[in-house]
Amino acid sequence: MQQVSIHAAKTNLSKLIEAAMGGEEIVIAKGGRPVVRLAPIRQGAFRIGLLTGQLGTAPDFLDPMEAAELDLWEGTP
């Protein structure tokens, strides 16, 4: 764990960010008392459309129903 003062953190912010991204724990202290921990944000592998083409096609709910199916919904024999 590396502890630095606020002044040193302002002076060496780029280096501290690189160290934190490399897995090192960085603590920023104010008056010798730890107040902030610098930690990297985990980057996920989130991707939109991951299952595109694998699920088939969904029915179009705006298409008109067939007469027999409509009768079942309406309860007419």
Image (cartoon, rainbow, N blue to C red):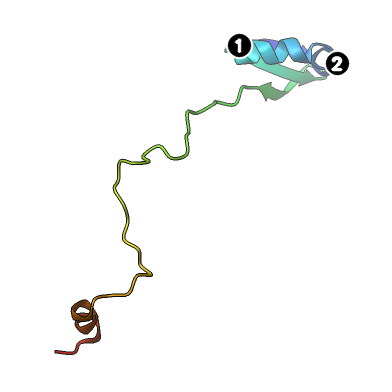
Judged left or right of residue 55, residue 28 is right
Q: Residue at x 73, y 9 (%)?
A: 15
List x then y, in percent, for residue 39. Answer: 63, 22
Number of marks in the image?
2
**Residue most toward the left?**
77
List x then y, in percent, for residue 74. Answer: 24, 86
> Gap between marks 2 and 1, in whole Å?
19 Å
Using the rendered view, name the quadrant where residue 20 is placed. Answer: top right
List x then y, in percent, for residue 8. Answer: 82, 12
Q: Amino acid at mark 1?
A: Glu
Residue 7's label in the rendered image is 2
SS at badge 2: helix
SS at badge 1: loop
List x then y, in percent, for residue 61. Answer: 35, 67
Q: Which residue position is annotated with label 1? A: 24
State which quarter of the image contains the C terminus: bottom left
Q: Amino acid at mark 2?
A: His
Crowding at mark 1 (Cα within 10 Å: few <14, some 14-19, many 20+): some
Front residue of this view, candidates 63 and 7: 63
Front residue of this view, candidates 63 and 52: 63
Q: Nearer the N terminus, badge 2 or badge 1?
A: 2
